[in-house]
Amino acid sequence: MPKLPDNGSVLPITRWGEDVMHRVNKPVTEFGDDLHRLVADMVATMRAAEGVGLAANQVGVDLQLYVFDCPDKDGVYHQGIVCNPVLELPEGKDRQLDEGDEGCLSLPGAFTKCVRPDFAKVTGVDENGEPVSYEGTGLLARCLQHETDHTQGMVFGDRLSRKFRKRLFAEAEEFAPDYPADWPITPMHNPEAHQDEPVSE
């Protein structure tokens, strides 16, 4: 398993509504120091926000890139860096659905059920342009789908019915005062109110 860098700086997380969150991001074509620095900063930001995944557009960068550090259905943690991801999902009789809760670091504090396949595989390249492949079940499957969606300009709210999307935004509005504009650079206010929440991506 690749080791994620631990020398990055925490960046503010971009929120839903910003243009970079709602358009297909640009493929990664240059692999070098700038990309390595961005990856390190994304890992630091993901960890500061206590998330399990983070896409580049969630720190305002228009690139098809994400990092993750996430458990699968058996509680085994997987971590990685994926540029230009291609998602593969089971079909037909192999397709089993998971109706678990989902949250997004770019809409902090809000969660709702979002139906997704319970297995996912992603292929792409790492920060050095070398081929990578990740697959898994449970939360890992959800994370790989959620983050790949981000690179395509989709947030998980786009997958919800109008009723559930309205409820999600109402919950986000309720908790908005707990998350400063530059969060997680500035820690959240009233963290006790969020102790029992599911993890966000």
Image (cartoon, rainbow, N blue to C red):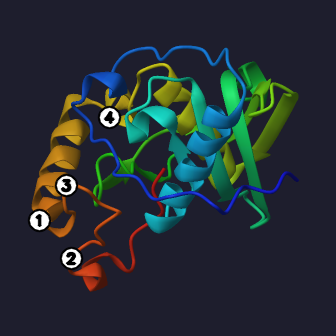
Q: In the rendered structure, which amino acid carries the disc numbered 3?
A: Ala
What percent of the width, then of the height, locates residue 155?
A: 38, 32
Q: List the residue tagged with mark 1.
A: 177
Where disc 3 sits, the SS reads: loop
Q: Earlier in the sequence, mark 3 or mark 2?
A: 3
> In screen coordinates, is 131 left or right of 163?
right
Where disc 2 sits, the SS reads: loop
Does residue 6 appear in this view? yes
Quick check: marks 2 and 1 in contact, CB under 8 Å?
A: yes
Q: In the rendered structure, which amino acid carries the disc numbered 4?
A: Gly
> In screen coordinates, is 58 left or right of 118?
left
Disc nearest the viewer among 4 and 2: 2
Q: Quadrant of residue 144?
A: top right
Q: List the residue tagged with mark 3.
A: 181
Disc 1 to disc 3, C-alpha distance:
9 Å
What mark, if any, has residue 72 been given in the picture? none
What is the crowding at mark 2: few (fewer than 14 residues within 10 Å), some, or many (at least 20)? some
Q: Which of marks 2 and 1 is nearer the N terminus?
A: 1
Disc nearest the viewer among 4 and 1: 1
Q: List the residue tagged with mark 4.
A: 157
